[in-house]
Image (spheres, helix red, strand yellow):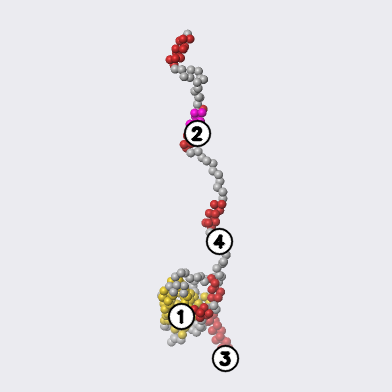
Amino acid sequence: MRRWIGGFLLAVLAACLFGCSASGPRFSEMAGSIPSLGENQGRIYFYRTSIMGMAVQPDVTVNGQFVGKSQPGSFFFIDRPAGTYRASARTEAEGTIDITLRPKQTAYILMSISAGLMVGRPEFERVAESEGRKELPPLAYGGSAPVSTKAASASSPAPVAGAAAATAVAAKPASPVAPSSPPAQAALTTASSARNTAPATTDATPFAKTSINDLRLLLQANR
């Protein structure tokens, strides 16, 4: 009977632990795809390792903004400009911690639930970077931002469609265009053609340069 009760309690404990834990990828699986920090940015890792009070999972806020949940066996992180921030979580009591970030600095905040009168009290503790980095790898990601477990590809980026199109257009030889006659040139050509078709007046033409009076005198002399 005792074995049955013990087995039942273990099954309930395992089911509760499975249901209460984060289901994201482990830190060791996604560490290579976590983006690097900006010039004036800092990063805060929140994580919880203990299963004590595992059913108690209060929301975590930073300067009043929701950033994640305190789940056993999980972690999440936020990036913020350098400065001072206050993280807090509330159940029957409120736990807070002030976090000062320098540019390019990473802070590690250990979350836990201590015994309380009815539910449990959330607590925060800033730990050394060496300790935080050692405890993160087996924890599951519990943040709300989507993440990838694949590291960024080292292959060269695909060409931009617009640039490819511009290259193709530049590489295509231009088709020869027949020169068109401007209006002034067309008018000159027409005038020249008219002059060429008009009968030319030369010295060989009979009476070409003789006036009408002279012609009359010549005709009277011939009579």
Q: Residue furthest front?
A: 203
Secondary structure of residue under mark 1: strand
Question: Magenta residues: mostly which secondary structure?
Answer: helix
Q: CA distance from mark 4 to mark 1?
A: 43 Å
| Badge 4 density bin: few <14, some 14–19, many ≥20, Cα 10 Å | few
**Which comes sooner in the sequence, label 4 or label 3?**
3
Q: Is residue 162 visible?
A: yes
Q: CA distance from mark 2 to mark 4?
A: 56 Å
Q: CA distance from mark 3 to mark 2?
A: 119 Å
The answer to whether the residues at label 2 and label 1 have Cβ atoms under 8 Å apart is no
The answer to whether the residues at label 4 and label 3 have Cβ atoms under 8 Å apart is no
Q: Is residue 182 above or below residue 212?
A: below
Q: Which residue is mark 1?
A: 126
Residue 60 place in picture, x, y as percent: 45, 77
Secondary structure of residue under mark 2: helix
Q: Which residue is mark 2?
A: 189
- Highlighted range, magenta: 189-196
Secondary structure of residue under mark 4: loop
| Badge 2 density bin: few <14, some 14–19, many ≥20, Cα 10 Å | few
Of badges 3 and 1, the one in the foreground is 1
